Amino acid sequence: MYQAKSIRTFIGSKNYEESRRFYRELGFEEIVLFDNMCLFKVNENLSFYLQDAYVKKWCNNSMVFLEVDDVDQCYQEITAKKLDGKYKYVRFTDIKQYDWGREFFMHDPSGILWHFGQFND
């Protein structure tokens, strides 16, 4: 049987250049693939594709869950960048506690909802 090596989602962008800038400022590494698509790497094994494509219903219903080892540290580092003051539609929630663990949410400039979460041990 084959062995899976990674899984990547494709997300859209309302303003492609703005979204590219946003994800670079967030700390992701950008690899330009085509004029209308980039790969953004969180680390060597975690990445996603950003496209120069926008469908409002698609973007407003897209979610990405990024599991982190320390949600408090992640929250501090990301919110310290003050991206919600630089980008009109970017916003963050406070960290919330759930039965399964803790997480906070971030909306990107195009409406993509990111979950940054840490599972209970």
Image: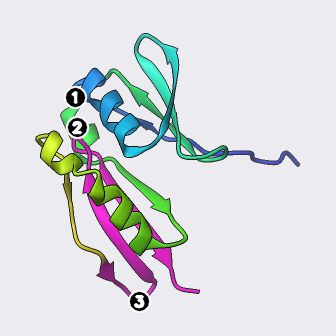
Q: Residue furthest top?
A: 35
Q: CA distance from mark 2 to mark 1?
A: 5 Å
Whichever of labels 1 and 3 marks the residue nearer the N terminus, that label is: 1
CA–CA distance in space, label 3 to label 2: 30 Å
Q: Secondary structure at mark 3?
A: loop
User: What residue does disc 1 label?
Assistant: 14
At 37% across and 72% down in the image, what residue appears? 103
Q: Is residue 5 above or below residue 56?
A: below
Tell whether label 1 touches label 2 (CB within 8 Å): yes
Amino acid on which disc 1 is placed:
Lys
- Mark 2 or mark 1, which has the lower sequence index? 1
Residue 55: x and y, percent? 24, 30
Q: Is residue 39 above or below residue 92?
A: above
Quadrant of the rendering where the C terminus is positioned? bottom right
Above or below, comparing residue 120 to residue 91 in the picture: below
Which segment did they paint magenta? 96-121
Task: Kindly indicate the quadrant of the structure image that contains residue 21.
Answer: top left
Q: Position of residue 115 (x, y in %)?
A: 37, 61
Disc 2: which residue = 110
Q: Secondary structure at mark 1?
A: loop
Amino acid found under the numbered disc labelled 2: Ser
Query: How far, Cα to Cα, is label 1 from label 3?
Result: 35 Å
